[in-house]
Amino acid sequence: MSVRKFLLPVSSTTSASAALQTGLMLAKRWNAHLQVLHIRSAQEFAPFVGEGMTGAMIEDMMSATERASGQRERSLEELFALAAEEAGVPVGEALHGRDEPSASFTTLTGREDELIAHRARLADLTIVPHPQAGEDVAAADALHAVLFDSGRPVLLAPVVPPETFGTRVAIAWNGTANAASALASVMPFVRQAEAVRILVCDDYRRPGPSGAEVAEYISHHGVTADVVQFYPRKGMTGAGLLAAATEFRADLMSMGAYSTASRLRQLILGGITRHVLEHAQLPVLMNR
């Protein structure tokens, strides 16, 4: 079990830096290819076009939008090139497939959510910048595009680049199919981890296998994991989960996403997934 290709969609230099460093760290660890993807929207100017605008005004707006988009693309590519150089990762599409790390930068034009979801379907893991990093809200759109329309796992990068990754793995377990999908995706990291802990909670649990059964399953992969009960903090299960992961000194956590309610309901009312997305300080691998 290994990972050989990572996808990293980027939309602004504000949020991309920490995610880039995380992605390059993983590429080096697995001798994998990191494909950094920037989407130029063909509809960026559309919301501003209204009645009363002349053809010349629309053309001027399109030109200004094109210039701004081009500048953003150049800034992101420069940031990528610098980060790859500092990490010592060779750059080039033709390099992937070798037993060494590599990285590339690709720009496509189209609908961001659609293109990211399509590309993610053929990536072992898609890394997305933290939604709360800077003022960039597109990162959250990218995360949800992968979760809901790719069938593949997504890794939420921390706001600050991690010093280590996957040496201590926390598995948030509630018995659901989503949690099982996340467990399957995190197993390559579990097999290499120094310590693994399964986190369970009565308020989090749903019908399905127990934490002890997860530990028994993991043992077949030659890994010993302990099972620890965590408790909500100030009435919030998500806060209790993150506190338990922090207490374990985890540098990677896996969990099923939006397993107890719809995404819309959680965004409106709150939920464990939403709390983790907003407050996680460590890398979080998620599946649906």
Image: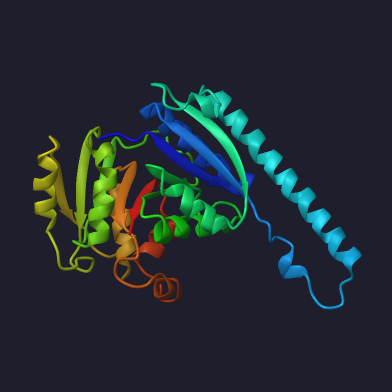
Q: Is residue 288 toward the left or the right of residue 139 in the image?
A: left
Up-down relation of residue 22 to residue 238 (above or below): above
Q: Quadrant of residue 44?
A: bottom right
Q: Is residue 154 toward the left or the right of residue 141 in the image?
A: left
Image coords of residue 235 (percent x, y): 31, 71
Up-down relation of residue 210 to residue 124 (above or below): below
**Residue nearer the viewer, 226 or 221:** 221
User: By what rule are the colours in the image chosen?
Assistant: rainbow
Up-down relation of residue 270 to residue 151 (above or below): below
Q: Is residue 57 toward the left or the right of residue 214 in the image?
A: right
Kindly tell me whether residue 111 is visible in this rendering.
yes
Image coords of residue 149 (percent x, y): 42, 59
**Residue nearer the viewer, 67 or 209:** 67
> Residue shown at 11%/46% (left/top)?
217
Kindly tell me whether residue 132 is visible in this rendering.
no
Q: Quadrant of residue 144?
A: bottom left
Up-down relation of residue 239 to residue 31 (above or below): below
Screen quadrant of the C terminus:
bottom left
> Residue shown at 37%/49% (left/top)?
284
Total count of labels: 0
Q: Is residue 113 toward the left or the right of residue 208 in the image?
A: right
> Residue shown at 12%/34% (left/top)?
222
Image coords of residue 174 (percent x, y): 21, 61
Image coords of residue 35 (percent x, y): 51, 37
Screen quadrant of the N terminus:
top left
